[in-house]
Amino acid sequence: MNLLEARGLGKAFGGVTVLQGIDFDLQAGEVHALMGENGAGKSTLMKILAGVHAADTGEILLDGKPVRLSSPREAQDLGIALIHQELQLMPDLSAAANVFIGRERRRTGWRLDHTRQLADTQVIFERLGLSLDPRRAVGTLSVAQQQMVEIAKALSLKARVLIMDEPTAALNPEEVEELFRVVRQVRAEGVGIVYISHKMDELRRIADRVTVLRDGRLIATQDMAGAEMDELIRLMVGRELQQTAHAAPDLSAAPVVLEARRLSRGRAVREASFTLRRGEILGLAGLMGAGRTELARLVFGADRRDGGDRRDGGDVLVNGKPADIRSPADAVRHGIAYLSEDRKGLGLATGLDVEANLLMPSLARFTGALGHIDRRAGQSAAQAFVQRLGIKTPSLGQTVARLSGGNQQKIALAKWLLRDCDILIVDEPTRGIDVGAKAEIHRLLRELAAAGKALIVISSELPELLGLAHRILVMCEGRISGELSAAEATQEALMALATRRETEPA
Ligand SMILES: Nc1ncnc2c1ncn2[C@@H]1O[C@H](COP(=O)(O)OP(=O)(O)OP(=O)(O)O)[C@@H](O)[C@H]1O
Ligand SMILES: [Mg+2]
């Protein structure tokens, strides 16, 4: 019997159909992957199964019996737990308090039983093979550890169905391994797991079956073992994806547009020096915490992420002249733009519509001599990007908060692409973006470089850097530990520099 089954599920938001006729099932002890382009309806489907949204049509069965899931609480009580695309823990509370939030263990007299919560959390952590102190505030944990707390919370709820929405979007390779180990363990205990991801290689490794959604419809469900990746991608995007060949141009004669000299900030960035030429795509590789984002933020004049002190040494030169960049506004004035890696703090005004968000940084470009805004020009530029990146929105007037996670990410990127700047720093530009749009974004970044812009691309996905960058800098513990040309760069060479292991001479 199916552990969980959906029959004929349908859902519309404000008259727009986002799911239609979905028949989906989940077995105990399987990992069932859910694939689909940004906006295909993956998160919405899972939110229906977890009681967050009500379906307009269809029914849901648990152990073959119809169930009503009119709130997340009801779903939880039935053993269905959803780990959202954006984690939803309370940063100031301990891991244990988060595990038991909303159903705190109490002693007589309603006093919180901290000791018991700690002990119970410890037991679950041990069962998962985690060495994590349940007393630690969740805000001090890494994203990976926070995921583990969410999983522990689900298990403490005796979840039989665990839904994970892009759990590895912000994890480094080691953390992904750790997560997989835990997922396999939970699967072995008989839990049914739905696993949403855009990362094909991960799906191949972890999933038993895969379901593809496209435009709100279920296209296919099949065993992962016999599945061809190209075929899955074709089912997902509805067409063949063309790969563009990558050839690094000779840029040795191109002018240096940006130079960093011995930039330093505490232990995060130590004496980092580099140059960036016109027309160049410079990759920045390194493990999580190696200092890549901190370096980018230093160049951009942004404060430290933890709000601590600012740059404590070094210089930035733009077009050969010292640039006194003390704030992002200074950086923008020098023609530098920065797309932040942080999805929650993307700098989107999520309450405003798509058009306002896209045009916000480039209003000057569409403002005439007399100060009036050429709305038509702005709109057509915005519309062009919506089409190009396949941003799924009913109109330019849609509120950004209503777009899917990946489509919000596309807006954040398009916003900076629309603003015409000479130096563009993009931090994890395709995190959470589907494979089709990803190829399009890569093409766009290459075109920008070919048109004379200079780009710095930070990415944790080595294949992305290898496919895109003309030259790659590797960071390790705040220092630039090496530099590889496109020709020399391989995953092994990059990893060796990122972990500072000695490489064999080439
Ligand atoms: N609360 C809402 N109001 C209006 N439209 C919504 C709402 N939530 C989702 N949508 C729309 O439903 C469609 C499906 O969104 P969903 O978040 O399920 O996509 P997804 O497959 O999870 O995409 P991604 O890979 O980007 O996370 C999108 O077009 C989205 O804009
Ligand atoms: Mg989603």
Image: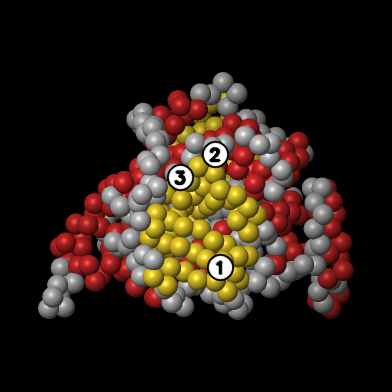
- At horizontal 14% and vertical 72% (from top left) the residue drawn is 368
- How far apart are labels 1 and 2 at the CA level? 25 Å
Q: Is residue 479 above or below residue 140?
A: above
Which residue is at the front of the view, 136 or 385? Answer: 385
Task: Find out if the beta carbon at label 3 lies less than 8 Å from the nearest ligand 1 atom.
Answer: no
The amino acid at mark 2 is: Ala
Task: Find out if the beta carbon at label 2 lies less than 8 Å from the nearest ligand 1 atom.
Answer: no
Q: Earlier in the sequence, mark 3 or mark 2?
A: 3
- How far apart are labels 3 and 2 at the CA level? 10 Å
The amino acid at mark 3 is: Ala
> According to the image, label 3 marks what residue?
469
Residue 56 drawn at (x, y percent)? 42, 49
Q: Is residue 137 above or below residue 413?
A: below
Q: Is residue 39 above or below residue 258?
A: above
Q: Label 3's element?
A: loop
Residue that protrudes farthest toward the left in the picture: 370
> According to the image, label 1 marks what residue?
263
Q: Is residue 371 above or below residue 487?
A: below
Tell us which disc is closer to us: 1 or 3: 1
Residue 471 drawn at (x, y percent)? 48, 46
- At horizontal 19% and vertical 57% (from top left) the residue drawn is 380
Q: Label 2's element?
A: loop
Q: Quadrant of the N terminus?
A: top right
> According to the image, label 2 marks what residue?
489
